[in-house]
Amino acid sequence: MTEPVTFDNIDNKGYSEGYLGDNIRARMKRDCKRFWAGDNISDYLHEGDVEKLINEAAEAFETVLDRLLIDRENDPNSRGTARRLAKMYFNEIMAGRYEPAPDATAFPNDSKDRYEGMLVVRSELRSMCSHHHQPVAGVAYIGIIAANKLIGLSKYTRIAQWCSRRGTLQEELCNDIAREIMRATDSENVGVYVQATHGCCENRGIMAHSSLTQTTVLKGSFATDSGTKKEFMDNIKLQQDFAPR
Ligand SMILES: [Zn+2]
């Protein structure tokens, strides 16, 4: 049995004996840090922590499989499943919770003939819904009017994927991408359109396997100027003609 974690038995570095996951959770609670499925908690992780957390989660997934009455000792396909699940959550489908923001080096856009037009980037996304941990698959179209900083084209997609590799709701995801793009570029004029299919509607519940959900977040001139909004929506249609989802 491990000792329960309380604020008293946490040392200066924030650790006590017991599960590392319990220690980290206690520190976040102490700091009133929100740690919902869609939140990034990389500030609370030190080097090597993820490996330890994977070990702890693998142990917990073993219990889940046992409770589901799956023979993980004799079924060869279920033998390593608990560890595979733990690694998949930390390193892949929820990696955006544990990794810091992608490094998006900004280049100045302040010359006399600087680019002042709209840029629209199509980013493929994989996410999962917080409610059912079912896959969400789709595309984000990120529109921006360049401000004084430019970031590399691939960075838009890296940021969008960092936001989506978590447990999310599509509405929140759309907001998160807009906020992080604004932060990385200093632009106040950003539009994000996401369309995605949801495993929780396809594989269970209403079993609607061709349903598509669309969300739009418009900031600055994308919200206030109908010409900018129309140009963004027209560009999305052109992108969809070029690369049907
Ligand atoms: Zn769901």
Image: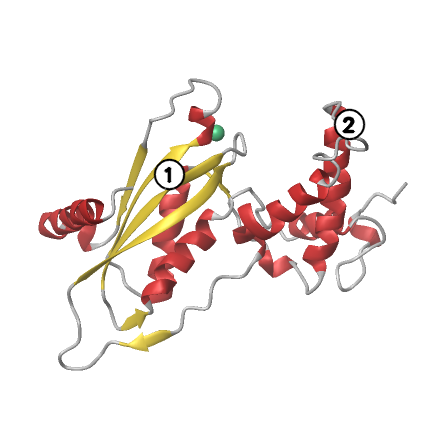
Residue on which the image places disc 2:
71
The furthest residue to the top: 206
Q: Of the numbered discs in the image, which one, if any, rests on residue 43?
A: none
Q: Quadrant of the N terminus?
A: top right
Describe the colour scheme in one phrase. Answer: secondary structure
Q: Is the residue marked by circle 1 packed among few (<14), some (14-19), or many (20+) residues within 10 Å? A: some
At label 1, the amino acid type is Glu
Label 1–label 2 contact, CB within 8 A: no
* Image quadrant assignment for residue 37: top right
Q: Nearer the viewer, mark 1 or mark 2?
A: 2
38 vs 141, left or right, is right
Q: Identify the residue position indicated by label 1 in the image.
A: 171
Q: Is mark 2 within 8 Å of ligand 1?
A: no
Count the labels in the image.
2
Q: Residue at x 71, y 44 (%)?
A: 83
Q: Separation of disc 1 and disc 2 at Cα?
A: 39 Å
Location of residue 81 in the rendering, given as x and y in whole percent from the top left corner: 70, 38
Residue 9: where, in percent of width, then height? 84, 53
Q: Identify which residue is drawn at 82% across, 52% down.
A: 8
Outermost residue, front direction? 76
Q: Secondary structure at mark 2?
A: loop
Q: Is residue 105 above or below residue 42?
A: below
Q: Residue at x 18, y 54 (%)?
A: 221
Image height check: is 167 above or below 178?
above
Q: Secondary structure at mark 1?
A: helix
> Is residue 234 visible to us here?
yes
Can you say which quadrant of the picture contains the C terminus? top left
Considering depth in this image, is 13 or 163 the residue closer to the camera?
Answer: 163
Give how far across and how far down residue 226 sits, in percent: 11, 47
